[in-house]
Image (cartoon, grey):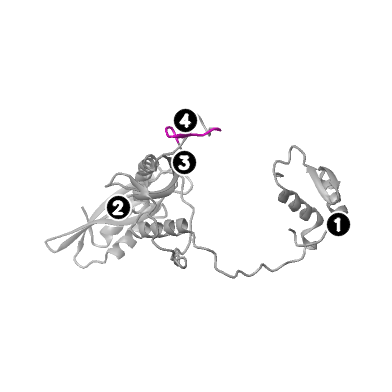
Amino acid sequence: MLGTTLTAADVADTFVRLGFAYKEQDGVFEVQPPQERLDIEIAEDLIEEVGRIVGYDKIPATPLPAFDNKPAINKNFYAAEKAREDLMSSGYSEVCTSVFADVGERMVLNKVDSVHPYLRDSLIPGLTQALVKNKPNKDLLGLKEIKLFEIGTVWKGGKEVVMLGSITEKNPATEQPLPAIQGLPLEYDALPLSDTARFEPFSKYPYMVRDIALWVPAGTDVLMVETRLCESAGPLAARVMPFDRFEKEGRVSLAFRIIFQSPERTLTEPEVAEAMVRVAEAVRAQGYEVR
């Protein structure tokens, strides 16, 4: 299994050095690992210990055997990826909720806690709770509507079933068995590559929201106004986004939402108010009128 040849003495030396009690007869070892070595459960675990003690450098590298045929396509995985990509392209975000519930058909023998002693029989309760928890972060995420989905196992009717559930702010949670793929696909679809330039940690501190509406001349570049607001709001402005626009008598009203958040501490009302004063002064200097 290690791809090398070892003598019985090499193997016995390993068990002696590890303090493993053993018996040997005709090259067959019967081993009793110490009680504290809970990671030693099967024969392969013992083989791994032998390789580790003998030294990985003494085990020659061996090329993997070539496959005559491509691995079979996993229909469940294929179906899950297809549903996942379709929903994400429609603005949904995936969540993974707990498989434990306070009610259900199948009780867990070794309960995680006394509150959720059952395996879930539906995705709907978890999705509903996830929507409630995510709605307060809608402004920070720059979303107009929270839309969630989950692909997960439920235990219902004496069976384990993979379900697809979804929920939005406008539509209640629904679920159905993961749609089956008709026919055998020949290969997996290529997954789209992320266009994210960089990843940043999110702040664990609460954010504060302020709105500002401006009268600007017709033809004014919205992006230019947004950039000016962001610069004048300062480094505590985590996000600036337009959310309303209408025209009246040759002028245009633009409304923006500014989300303030610090990665290091909880903000105070005075410092956000001070930032909004700077914002108002900056847009007036551009000739805009604060509504």
Q: In the rendered structure, does residue 103 fall within the stretch colored magenta? A: yes
Q: Secondary structure at mark 1?
A: loop
Find residue 64 and report its horizontal and vertical position in percent: 67, 67
Expressed as whole percent of the image width and height from the top left, the position of residue 257 reads: 30, 52
Do the residues under discs 2 and 4 have CB atoms within 8 angstroms? no
The mark nearer the N terminus, 1 or 2, is 1
* Residue at the disc numbered 2: 144
**Disc 4 target residue:** 115
- Which residue has dot 1 on it? 7
- What amino acid type is highlighted by mark number 3? Val
State the CA–CA distance, disc 1 to disc 4.
55 Å
* Amino acid type at mark 1: Thr
Earlier sequence position, callout 1 versus callout 3: 1
Identify which residue, 70 or 90, lies in the foreground: 70
Q: Is residue 198 magenta?
A: no
| Tag shown at residue 99 | 3
Q: Quadrant of the N terminus?
A: bottom right
Q: Which residue type does callout 4 highlight?
A: Val
Q: Amino acid at mark 2?
A: Lys
Dot 4 or dot 3, earlier in sequence = 3
